[in-house]
Image (cartoon, rainbow, N blue to C red):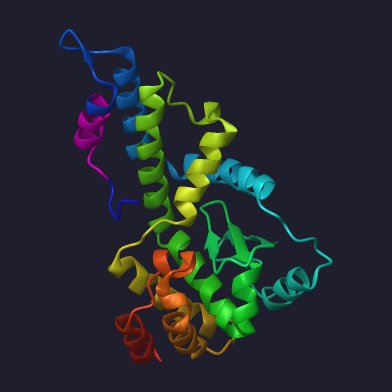
Amino acid sequence: MKKGLMSLAAIVVLSGSVTGCINGNLNTASLGAGMDAFKAVTLSESDAKALAARATQQMDQTNKVLSASSKHSKRLTRLVKKFRNEDGLALNFKVYGSNEMNAFAMANGTVRVYQGLMNKLTDDELRFVIGHEIGHVKLGHSLKAMRTAYATSALRKGAASQGGDVARLSGSQLGALGEKLVNAQFSQSQETDSDTYAVKFMKKYGFNPRAGLSVMEKFQKMDGGKSSMLSSHPASGAREKHIARLL
């Protein structure tokens, strides 16, 4: 996953290189990719939310979603009851029954927490992680990641002579897009800004913001940084120091 948006020109040029030319002219697949790339760069917030909703629906179908009566779902419901709506963003929470160490939020207010992460963190540590993920949404990072993910999928669609309409994405494309978003690699400044958001988030709702420090300490000890949560959200010493300064 690229950390920044490609320029429109770069995407169109890359689209041409992937789809090829016929007698020196771009073929229809290449032109389709170029138009799709333009759509990716100009993807509106409302489009991003609609696309996130469809990607979430696909991911919920392909992942094991724990029932509301499960102990993990009950715990999640209890620990998020103060912030079902965050600064105008309606949130919807579910637990994935996977031992993966992961959590993510999407532009439409989707928040998914993996059972594996819940098993390792305290309530306030989980709230900090959720606040951090919400921060990526509220600060516009998720929209940028959506545009980048959509742009890269446009290249594949262009090669297959498919259109660039959001509504025409297939289930497999939505699943691939969702996977890209879950594993999106944010820049160092974006991670720092989301950590700042999470600290303010914790203080706002009366939770212990020092949980952010213990989260970083735990992450640095887990799996040597190999789990998906750690690879997409590196827990560096610099982030821990930043949180400490905020406190």
Residue extending farthest left: 24
From the viewer's side, name the closer residue of 154 and 193: 154
Q: Which picture quadrant has residue 34?
A: top left
Q: Position of residue 13 (x, y in %)?
A: 20, 30
- Work out which residue is located at the far right of the displayed protein and give it: 69
In the rendered image, residue 245, in percent from the top left (x then y), is placed at 33, 90
Task: Report which quarter residue 185 is drawn in.
Answer: bottom left
Magenta segment, which residues?
A: 6-16
Q: Is residue 191 magenta?
A: no
Which residue is found at the position 30% from the left and 51% from the top? 2
Residue at 49% from the left image edge and 39% from the top image edge: 47
Tell me the quadrant of the picture where the C terminus can be found: bottom left
Inspect this view and state whether residue 42 appears. Answer: no
Q: Is residue 65 visible?
A: yes
Q: Is residue 56 left or right of residue 177?
A: right
Residue at position x 58%, y 77% in the image: 127
Tell me, yes or no, whether the highlighted magenta stretch contains residue 7.
yes
- The image position of residue 70, as x and y in percent, is 81, 68
Pinpoint residue 65: horizontal percent, then vertical percent: 72, 56
Query: Is 207 positioned to the left or the right of 219 in the image?
Result: right
Question: How many labels were placed on the picture?
Answer: 0
The main secondary structure of the magenta stretch is helix
Q: Quadrant of residue 24?
A: top left
Picture layout, residue 233 above or below residue 170: below
Q: Nearer the viewer, residue 204 or 143?
A: 143
Vertical order, 16 against 64 (above or below): above
Vertical arrangement, residue 200 with respect to residue 12, above or below: below
Please name the residue shown 56% across and 82% down the image: 125
Q: Residue furthest top?
A: 23
